[in-house]
Image (spheres, helix red, strand yellow):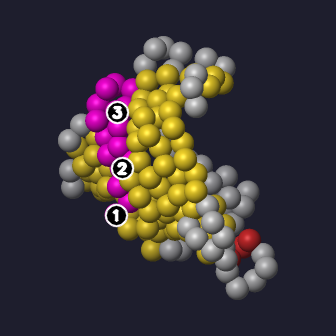
Amino acid sequence: FVGFSKDTTTLDGVFITKKATGKPATVETDNAKITYPDGTSTTWSGTLTYTYEKGNSCEWRDNTISVTGSISGKNRNGVDFTATITKALVYKYGCDTFHHFVPVSGTVELTVGGVVSTIDFGDGSCDKKYTITTNGTVTEYKFGSNGHDDND
C-alpha cells in the first residue's frame, strides 16, 4: 500500500499474505505505517501465522484458529513496542452471542518502552476472560457478548 486512505487516516507499507491448501496462512508486514489525522503515526513489522483447524462436524461451531508470531514497531508516541505470542493464541467460534471467533487461550508478551506485560487468554474455555499482568499486578478483563472488550 502506498498512500491508501480511509477518511483522514493513511496506510502505507508492504503486506504479504501466503496461503496454500492444507498449510497455515501467514501475514507478513514490512514497514507498515498508519498516519492519523493529528499527524501522529504508528509503524510495525512482523509475521503472524494462522492455522485453521476444522472440528468434527460440518459446522463452524467447533472450528478453531491458532495464531503464532510477533510484531514490533513504534506506537503513536514514538515509543518502541514488541508483541510476541509466547503460547499460541487459540480462537473459538461461537463463544459470544454474535458468533465471532473469540480468543480462549494463549499468551502474548507485550513490551512497550521497556515495560513488560503478559496477556493471558485462559485455559480454552469460553468464559471470555483474560488477564493482563504488569509489574506483578494482575488485572482481569472480560469480552462482552459481541466479542469486544467490555472494559473501559
Instruction: Tell whether position 70 is magenta.
Output: no
Whether residue 77 sits left or right of residue 9 in the image: it is left
Distance in Å between CA atoms under marks 1 and 3: 20 Å
Q: Earlier in the sequence, mark 1 or mark 3?
A: 3
Residue occupying image coordinates x 58% and y 51%? 17
- For residue 4, above or below residue 64: above
| Magenta-colored span | 71-86
The kind of secondary structure element at disc 3 is strand
Dot 1 amino acid type: Thr
Dot 2 amino acid type: Ala
Find the residue positioned furthest to the top.
38
Judging by the rendered image, the residue that carries numbered circle 1 is 86
- For residue 144, above or below residue 41: below
Whether residue 142 sits left or right of residue 119 in the image: it is right
Residue occupying image coordinates x 69% and y 66%? 94
Judging by the rendered image, the residue that carries numbered circle 3 is 74
Distance in Å between CA atoms under marks 3 and 2: 11 Å
Image x and y of residue 123, in percent: 45, 74
